[in-house]
Image (cartoon, coloured by chain):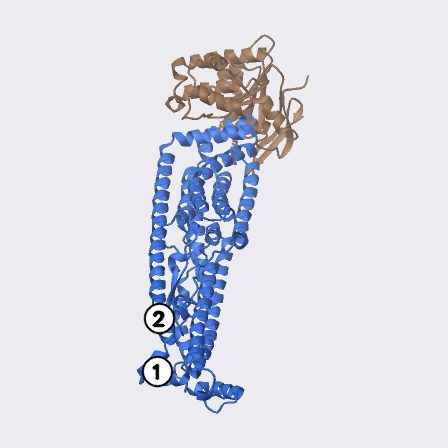
Chain colours: A blue, B brown
Amino acid sequence: MSAGLSIAREEWRLWARSRVVLLAGVIVAVLLVVTSALTALRVADEAEARAARQASAEATFLAQPDRHPHRMVHYGHYAFRTPPPLAAFDPGVDAVTGQSIFLEGHRQNTAMFADARAGADLGGFAGLTPANIYQLLLPLLLIIIGHGVLLRERESGTLAVLLAQGQSALTLAGGKALALAGVVGAFLLPVTALAAYGAARGEPALTAALMVAGYGLYLAVWAALILAVSLWVRQRSVALGVLIFVWLLTALVVPRLGINAGSAAIDAPGKIESDLVMLAEQRKLGDGHNAADPAFAALQKQVLEQYGAEKVEELPMNWRGVVAGYSEKKLTDLMNQYAEKRMAQEAEQSRIVTLFGFASPTLAVGAASRTLAGTDLATHHRFLREAEALRFDFVQGLNDLHATKLTFADDAKRSADPEAEKRTRVNAAAWRLLDDFRFVPDPAAARAARAALPLAMLLGWLVLLGGAIVAGARRLRP
Amino acid sequence: MIPALEARSLSLVRDGTTVLEDVSFTVAPGEIYALLGGNGAGKSTTLLTFLGFLAPSCGSVLVNGRAVAEDVDGARSAIAYLPEAASLYGHLDAYENLGYFLDLAARKVSRAAMDEALDQVALPREARGRRMQSYSKGMRQKTAIALALLRDTPILLLDEPTSGLDPVAIDEFHDMLKGLADAGRSVLMVTHDVYGACQVADRVGLLRGGRLVGSFEAAAGERIDTETVHAAFAAREAA
Ligand SMILES: Nc1ncnc2c1ncn2[C@@H]1O[C@H](COP(=O)(O)OP(=O)(O)OP(=O)(O)O)[C@@H](O)[C@H]1O
Ligand SMILES: [Mg+2]
């Protein structure tokens, strides 16, 4: 193994003396510093703006004087999600979906019905992030630095001398692999620093470490590919061509194909189409603001029977509030049904795209990266569901107040009678039922489990290429 | 006595064409064997089979009596090989190159020993600390020969070792080879230099189209007759 180390050390000495490699290293370092700084700044900015909006929304909401509960239903509320620490490295779908949604009565949050064709979790290229540099640029740089690792020796005639010293071709290949691994290690320094920074800001050690390991695995796959091609091809120019072609294919073409395949397989309707279908169904449910809507006749009959009453005025509670709650429930069920269908489609699309990771390590590492960072589609969907549950509880709480604390008589004449209007106000303290909504990222183990498949794909690639290297080394001749 | 090198009915097919056909010869310990032949005759190929880089399609090659196919590592560690158009790293100086390659051969060699070998091949002292990219062809060849010498192996396979050397350096190189042979080393050398081969070799083999078509041996106490070999060479090439 010491021979392998000597070979690697010699390669590093050559690279250290080569201006091209140094220049490339400087460019990468600058790019990573700039994108990390920009992404971190943006995340911090957004977090600040979000905190301010959250505080002001809550303050305004809670500072409301006594009001009719239904006014509050329409007042609305922001639900926010603080980006997880690793989002500074890979903002994932957050860059497309954003991190805050507006919640109000009768309406599901708008983000839930964002256009499915926007292709959120589908490896879309949203700005220059450190993750993008790692996924796209560093492999290219590795190719430029490493494609000559063996063929340079062949073309200059030193390969024969090297092999003549009694070391096996396998040792030689091992030494060159070690040399490339050294470059990969150097490339991993920035992401290691970012992961450590994330861990310092509350990211679990497991996900932070897996993030570094995932990119290490990804770059190792590229290094292995470079070495394998060097062993199977006889000319440096051919090797460079082949590697650039593979890069184009796996980093750019296959991800596109994956997204197209995902969309084609699912055929998710656009926003306008689904909005129209839902509106039509919604109309059948009746208008919750109008307690006399014929849509509620059956409900009225049933409730009157239950309480042995003749008229709604005789009920022990406010019929208008009951209708508002009933229709909110119906409406929410309908909308949830649509939202779940939509989310299932998006998840299926995302799953198909991830499966293309078998053909493209770039897709695989992207999926693993987003998942580990907590910026993947699954996390976003959970946020939407939790926000929706919050919205529903909040609105139903107000409808409950409407039904139990306000009399039907006062409610009916409140626009004509100022005294009645006063009595239909509920004390502001009563609707402080709105919880401090705090979205918690998935536990590290859950994220790690979800990232297992794409990480296993990368491992599979590495094993496959390792086999190609061993086979190629066996047939290496001077 | 077990020959240092032996080819037994060696045949080799590369990419469908027969490159070597039924080649047999031996090189005894302390013997210098020169392989002559036109371009593409199969000389370099023959050397590669002894190193196990190419496997015979038929027949076998043996190093110190052991089939190379059975013990490639043993064969390689017994042989110092000077490749055709040998080249070392241009970004390193002579000492760094020798140190690196000898390290791979698991040989620790002192600076003084390097200087001694470089003196033997007459590489100017002032050049030794310079990066080899500034060397002339002959200087590079000399350094590569020094590397083969420093391996200190019982067998040397040299592919056109005198290519690029000036006449004085060639004479000195031949004297050095004789010294090595006298010390018991075996040398299998490929060359285009008929005169040089006859000067230095104990035996000369003539290879043509992958077949060994002639073999010449020096009478006791004499050198091989250059004229005879040259005539055979020219006649065979014309045929
Ligand atoms: N990599 C290869 N693949 C297929 N055939 C090859 C290869 N290398 C050499 N050959 C063929 O093998 C034959 C012998 O080549 P070899 O290099 O042994 O010749 P040589 O005697 O050393 O010639 P030269 O004097 O030009 O060095 C030639 O016909 C050549 O075309
Ligand atoms: Mg040759």
* Distance from mark 2 CB to nearest ligand 1 atom below 8 Å: no
Q: Where is residue A470 in the image (x, y as percent from the top left)?
A: 57, 39
Residue count near mark 2 (Cα–Cα under 10 Å), binned few <14, some 14–19, many ≥20:
few
Q: Which of B203 and A389 is in front in this view?
A: A389
Distance from disc 2 to disc 1, alpha carbons, whole Å, reads 22 Å
Q: Are marks 2 and 1 in contact (CB under 8 Å)?
A: no
Residue A325 badge: none
Q: Where is residue A71 in the image (x, y as percent from the top left)?
A: 35, 75
Above or below A412: residue A185: above
Q: Which of A405 and B27 is in front in this view?
A: A405
Q: Mark 2 points at which residue?
A: A75
- In this view, which residue lies farthest toward the right? B1
Amino acid on which disc 2 is placed? Tyr
Q: Name the residue under label 1.
A: A420
Q: Can residue B33 be seen in this view?
A: yes
Q: Position of residue A198 (x, y in %)?
A: 44, 47
For the residue labelled by badge 1, is the local secondary structure a helix, a strand or a loop?
A: helix
Amino acid on which disc 1 is placed? Ala
Above or below A441: residue A163: above
For the residue labelled by badge 2, is the local secondary structure a helix, a strand or a loop?
A: helix
Q: Nearer the viewer, mark 2 or mark 1?
A: 1
Above or below B166: residue A173: below
